[in-house]
Image: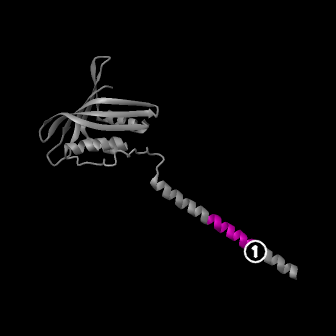
Amino acid sequence: MIDEKAASMTQAKQRDNAWVFRKFWQVALMLGCVAAVLWGCTINPFAPRLELSERSGIGLGDQRTIDGFFRNFEFAYLTRDTALYGQLLSERFTFVYRDFDNGVDVIWPRDVELVTTSGLFRSAEILDLRWNTVVFQDGDARQVQVVRSFRLRVGFRINEVFEITGNANFTLVRDDTGSVWRLSRWRDESNF
């Protein structure tokens, strides 16, 4: 009888130990899931990392001003935000660059610009646009030409970084003084 009681107590103790063991792993798994969710909210492995150390003051600007337009343009590049970039372009946008090898201007429309820029945003490991001085500005309340110097660093590999410098010759348009500025024409005047 004592052996049966001892065996029964041993079995009960083993069941209790198994229950504690299962509960321990259930709690550990739950805590692991919570930690993964919290970590996932702060780090997105599919988004490029932002290098904000020198540029903590940059953010969105008021696009009803020319300075705000340029600030948003720079922010779109910094954050690789294709939606924001698309909002900067007018529906009749054209990009123009000089093909020096063939001696002709190459022009592409808004849809080609969006696809090209989206590809750049996705594939570049390093992408750093800096606007410099305004070289020329003239226009009225609804259309203005701004020629502004810039520096764009693009790297597809850490050890392969290209620096493009020069001027961006922009034509900005808007419907009225309360509307936002949009880029209607961009003539690239860079060293690229």
Q: Amino acid at mark 1?
A: Lys
Give the quarter of the figure containing the N terminus.
Answer: bottom right
In the image, what residue occupies the spot 57% across and 63% down? Answer: 30
Q: In the rendered image, is residue 81 in sight?
A: no
Depth order, front residue of 186/77: 77
Q: Position of residue 66 (x, y in %)?
A: 20, 42
Q: Main secondary structure of the magenta part?
A: helix
Question: Based on the displayed image, in which of its 4 quarters is residue 166 positioned?
Answer: top left
- Asked if residue 139 lies in the magenta stretch, the reply is no
Residue of label 1: 13
- Asked if residue 25 lies in the magenta stretch, the reply is yes
Depth order, front residue of 30/49: 49
Q: Position of residue 133 (x, y in %)?
A: 23, 35
Question: Based on the displayed image, in which of its 4 quarters is residue 134 positioned?
Answer: top left
Above or below — where is 191 with respect to 64? Answer: above
Identity of the residue furthest to the top in this view: 102
Q: Is residue 130 left or right of residue 20?
A: left
Give the quarter of the figure containing the C terminus.
Answer: top left
Identity of the residue furthest to the bottom in this view: 1
Q: Position of residue 47 (x, y in %)?
A: 44, 45
In the image, what residue occupies the spot 81% across and 77% down? Answer: 8
The residue segment tinted magenta is: 13-26
The mark tally for this picture is 1
> At numbered mark 1, what does the secondary structure look like: helix, strand or loop?
helix
Q: Is residue 61 left or right of residue 45?
A: left
Q: Position of residue 52 (x, y in %)?
A: 37, 46
In the image, what residue occupies the spot 53% across and 59% down? Answer: 35
In the image, what residue occupies the spot 67% across and 66% down? Answer: 22
Q: In the rendered image, is residue 183 in sight?
A: yes
Above or below — where is 76 with respect to 109? Answer: below
